[in-house]
Image: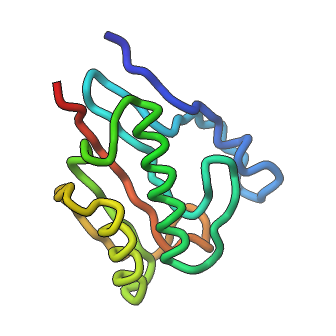
Amino acid sequence: MAHKRFRKFNMRDRYVGKVGHDIDFGLCMAVKAGNRVFLRGQSATSLNGVYAGDDPAAQTETAMTNVKALLEEAGAELAHICKTTIYITDYAYREPVYRVIGRWLEGVYPCSTGLIVAGLAKPELKMEIDIEAIIPE
């Protein structure tokens, strides 16, 4: 069975006109491989391109809205999430980010790794979340 790729795009189209961003790199937002679903890191920009603003909780709300939508497109749901990796750019953002994720994933109990990083793909991003899910057979 071939992997199914959802919402394909090229980075050069996402960063048009930005210095240093003429990168020809094809990606997608989600990959379904058998009953496993991998999501691209989600953050402050909605799937239709609207930026959530600088508030870490608002960025997380947008990220989790994206996560839910992408999982559903791949035939999965939030309850199928097995692993999260959460990146934040300042320890002060930990509480607001984790409160939002905790509300979205209440009762799911995924394994999770949290990292404080020097920066993300865009300087305005305060958080990003990676998701791996397995759809029960």
- Which residue in the rendered view is the most extreme toward the bottom? 92
| Point 40% across, 89% down: residue | 92
Query: In the visual, does 18 lie left or right of 132?
Result: right
Q: How many marks?
A: 0
Quadrant for residue 62, please give it: bottom right
Depth order, front residue of 42/24: 42
Residue 48 % position (x, y): 68, 48
Q: Position of residue 125 (x, y in %)?
A: 56, 70
Residue 65 place in picture, x, y as percent: 49, 55
| Picture residue at 43% right of the left edge, 21% below the top | 4
Task: Indicate the colouring scheme.
Answer: rainbow
The quadrant the N terminus occupies is: top left
Residue 120 vs residue 47, the one in the foreground: 47
The answer to whether residue 25 is above or below residue 93 is above
Residue most extreme to the top? 1
Q: Is residue 71 left or right of residue 115?
A: right
The quarter of the displayed image where residue 58 is located: bottom right
Q: Is residue 54 above or below residue 102?
A: below
State which quarter of the image contains the C terminus.
top left
Indicate left or right for 6 with 52 as reference. left
Vertical comparison of 13 with 105: above or below: above
Q: Is residue 117 above or below residue 38?
A: below
Q: Measured from the top left, where is residue 130 in percent x and y?
A: 37, 53
Quarter of the view holding residue 96 = bottom left
Tell which of 24 and 16 is nearer to you: 16
Q: Residue at x 61, y 48 (%)?
A: 47
Of 23 and 135, the residue lying toward us = 135
